[in-house]
Amino acid sequence: MTPPNAGMTARERARAELTREIKESARRQLAKAGANGLSLRAISRELGMVSSALYRYFPSRDDLLTALIIDAYDSIGSEVEAAIAAVPADSAAGTGEAEEGSVGSARVRERWLAAGRAVRAWAREHPHEYALLYGSPVPGYRAPEATIGPASRVPFALIGLLRDRGITAPSQAAAAPPDIEMPDALREQTAVVLAALADGVNSPGNLPPDLLVRGVIAWTQLFGMVSFELFGQFVGSFDPTDAFFENAVAEMATLVGL
Amino acid sequence: MTPPNAGMTARERARAELTREIKESARRQLAKAGANGLSLRAISRELGMVSSALYRYFPSRDDLLTALIIDAYDSIGSEVEAAIAAVPADSAAGTGEAEEGSVGSARVRERWLAAGRAVRAWAREHPHEYALLYGSPVPGYRAPEATIGPASRVPFALIGLLRDRGITAPSQAAAAPPDIEMPDALREQTAVVLAALADGVNSPGNLPPDLLVRGVIAWTQLFGMVSFELFGQFVGSFDPTDAFFENAVAEMATLVGL
DNA sequence: TGTACATCAGTGAACGCGCGTTCACTGATGTAC
DNA sequence: TGTACATCAGTGAACGCGCGTTCACTGATGTAC
């Protein structure tokens, strides 16, 4: 077991360490003043350096923001992936009918619920990073392309669950069939997303388009709900949100055929 | 027809006018720098005044923010209410079965769709005000109680549609019955919300609790979707969002039994 | 209708504070021979 | 193993800019008699 710093010079280790400390301090700043209020001078003060020294580590404030955003997407992404993986796949036990060569459907539903809970748990533990990712855009800041990959981890994990169930026909558990025809634009967009899914993992994205659309509906519902909780829209009604949240995630699981 | 300024002294009229201009300038500021960047000095510069003069109109920056928030909630609220009202109630025509003493169900579904479209249209026309209401909280700012009423207009309008249909039993169009029992906490919360609904309008809020919960699910889905569109989460996938949006609103209409 | 006084809008200077970024520099760490 | 040179981290001063809020003031508008 080689330590993470193996083969680094003292200078390199110091650099890695300080880079980490800068980002940690920045995350603390976020909590106090929000993304707009993120101040390089405040960070340098906290670390006991002179503000210009930070420019050895991040060429500008925006680059630091980008690093924080990527870290946060990776953080929530890996939490969700871990929560899914923590629900054992080889069910055998109990309830649902297992289909050939695929994970038991009751297990997939459990994984869906676990993923939803993981999103909410992460958001509540890191409210300011959540706001950075899913709240108002920072004025004047444009997210570079490098954020797209990490940002995709959660939706891909969710959609992946639908595929994992091995569904090729509309689920029996799903609601009534769609009431409106899918227009061409929507059909094309689903094809693009399914192709991207096929890239990421081995199995092809052979998901019925209407099920993908429902997955995206469920995805937006999940984050809409978490945003409302964190940003205060539920104050005076569904607050605390625990019971409503559980119910909603379960309803959405049913909507997507789990 | 008395003009809106009838019976006001010149001083009062000038005051009303300038209050309006300050808020308009503030809204333009919002677009450039976001809520955190809202600057009294910038406003005063735009209006050709000295910055301290603004304190004759708003005792502090936070009070100005509050005024903007209330205006914005009222703006989206009245848009949604108007969109609902614009779909005629006395259907008679065509499709759905009308129940006794209630609006035709096909019309209610149309109204639901219209409400969803109105939310999205307003959000796209006023993205920065939308972000002010539904985006990240402004650090250091706590919304006063006076914002709660205006903030309720949209959810009440949506839930009101469910009640208008005159449903007392779960809808035939809705998806499979809820998979989990409603815990006591959720039952209590629904009761509180239903009581508030009964206050606001004549008819009692005799809505089945599980239908209210679905209404809130649909509400969060709607705003989650609009936030994702405005805040950039759909870039590279469901962008433009028109087709997906229509599909999702229709699916949610079905979920709530319309 | 006219005068005396009170109310109020807007001024301009000041307080005390913050910020991102650049630049020439010192001194320590790392590398090639 | 030791020396010479290159790389790099961190300093400190400066540039040019921003902000919210307070306060004593002038002069116009409104009101009561």
Image: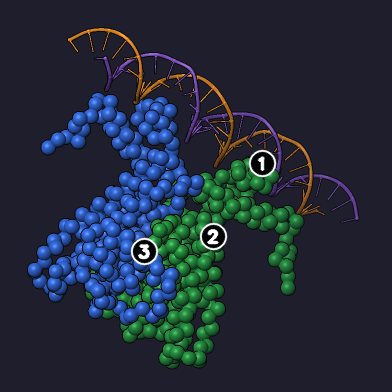
Chain colours: A blue, B green, C purple, D orange
Residue A209, image x, y percentages: 33, 71
A159 or A43, which is in the foreground? Answer: A159
What amino acid type is highlighted by mark number 2? His
Residue A43 x %, y %: 39, 34
Image point (34%, 63%), residue name: A193
For the point 54% across and 83% down, the residue is B88
For disc 3, the marked residue is A192
Image vertical order of residue B152 relative to residue B169, above or below: above
Q: Is mark 2 on a helix, strand or loop?
A: loop
Residue at the spot 25% in from the left edge and 56% down from the top edge: A80
Quadrant occupied by the C terminus of chain B? bottom left
Q: Which chain is disc 1 placed on?
A: B
Q: Which chain carries label 2?
A: B
**How many C-alpha atoms fall within 10 Å of the one at disc 1: few (<14), some, or many (≥20)?**
few
Write down the residue under mark 2: B126
Q: Nearer the viewer, mark 2 or mark 1?
A: 2
Q: Is residue B105 visible?
A: yes
Q: Mark 1 points at which residue?
A: B50
The answer to which image quadrant residue A44 occupies is: top left
CA distance separating discs 2 and 1:
28 Å
In the rendered image, residue A14, in percent from the top left (x then y), is placed at 28, 28
